[in-house]
Image (spheres, rainbow, N blue to C red):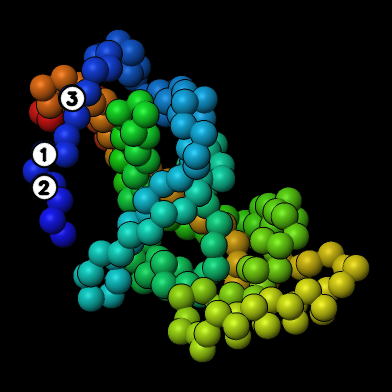
Amino acid sequence: MNRDLHSIRRDYQFEDLLEEQAGNEPFTLFDTWLEKAIEACPDDPTAMTLSTVDQDGWPHSRVVLLKQRNDSGFSFFTNYDSEKGQQLAQNNKACMTFFWPALSRQVRIEGTIEKVSREMSVTYFASRPRGSQLAARTSRQSATIESREALQKAFEAEEQAFDDQNVPCPDNWGGYVLKPNFIEFWQGRPSRLHDRICFTQKDEGWLRTRKAP
């Protein structure tokens, strides 16, 4: 690459993130930030980087979509036999990171992950577009495949198999929920003096602290 990467930078010109704005628990602030991101970032505002660790201690990250945020935690859906599914079966500690460049904001969420109820998975699957349902049945996610053509033929076979029928949710497909024990809110600020407000779960509730940028 001939481009000068050192010169690519910008100064962040957003308002402070102060303790009184952050509140005493993280969920209200997260919901407020997510609503603002949905308004300001039309392309995939619910996209997040999910990081897991394999049995040898190697980290793996990929982008998935947040599909629910409630009192249980932060939920997404996937193939349980995928690489991330296998890694979560071995080590259920994970991290989710949201980054909204238009707002110069980042949220990092750490915690433990478990599967959601089968009922919740089936209900969400039924709400997906039909093409996405068929793709979930077609794809052996993360497995090596022969070619794009082979994948397309498998998809067409699923189309024919469920012609004029509801597409059932595969047994190996469903949701996960991350139950957080740490959440950090990062707000970009001028001269790299960024704001970092952190919430750590304690027995009595949430401990709020500020970290240096």
Badge number at residue 4: 2
Instruction: Mark 2 or mark 3: name the one nearer the start of the chain.
Output: 2
Q: CA distance from mark 2 to mark 3?
A: 18 Å
Alpha carbon distance from label 1 to label 3: 12 Å
Residue 11's tag is: 3
- Say whether marks 1 and 3 touch (CB < 8 Å): no
Vertical comparison of 154 with 45: above or below: below
Q: Which residue sits at x=32%, y=30%?
A: 105
Which residue is at 51% across, 56% downward? 176
Q: Is residue 141 left or right of residue 120?
A: left
> For numbered disc 1, what is the local secondary structure?
helix
Q: Secondary structure at mark 3?
A: loop
Badge 2 amino acid = Asp
Side (left or right) of 124 relative to 208: right
Q: Residue at x 9, y 43 (%)?
A: 6
Q: Position of residue 22 (x, y in %)?
A: 33, 18
Q: Residue drawn 22% across and 70% down?
A: 57
Q: Are marks 2 and 1 in contact (CB under 8 Å)?
A: yes
Whole-percent x and y of residue 25? 37, 24
Residue at the disc numbered 1: 7
Q: Quick check: can you spot residue 23?
A: yes
- Where residue 44 appears, as percent x and y from the top left, is 50, 42
Quarter of the image with the N terminus in it: bottom left
Type of amino acid under label 3: Asp
In this view, the residue in front, 112 or 153, is 153
Rounded to the nearest whole Å, what is the CA distance between mark 2 and mark 1?
A: 6 Å
In the picture as drawn, the residue positioned furthest to the bottom comes out as 146
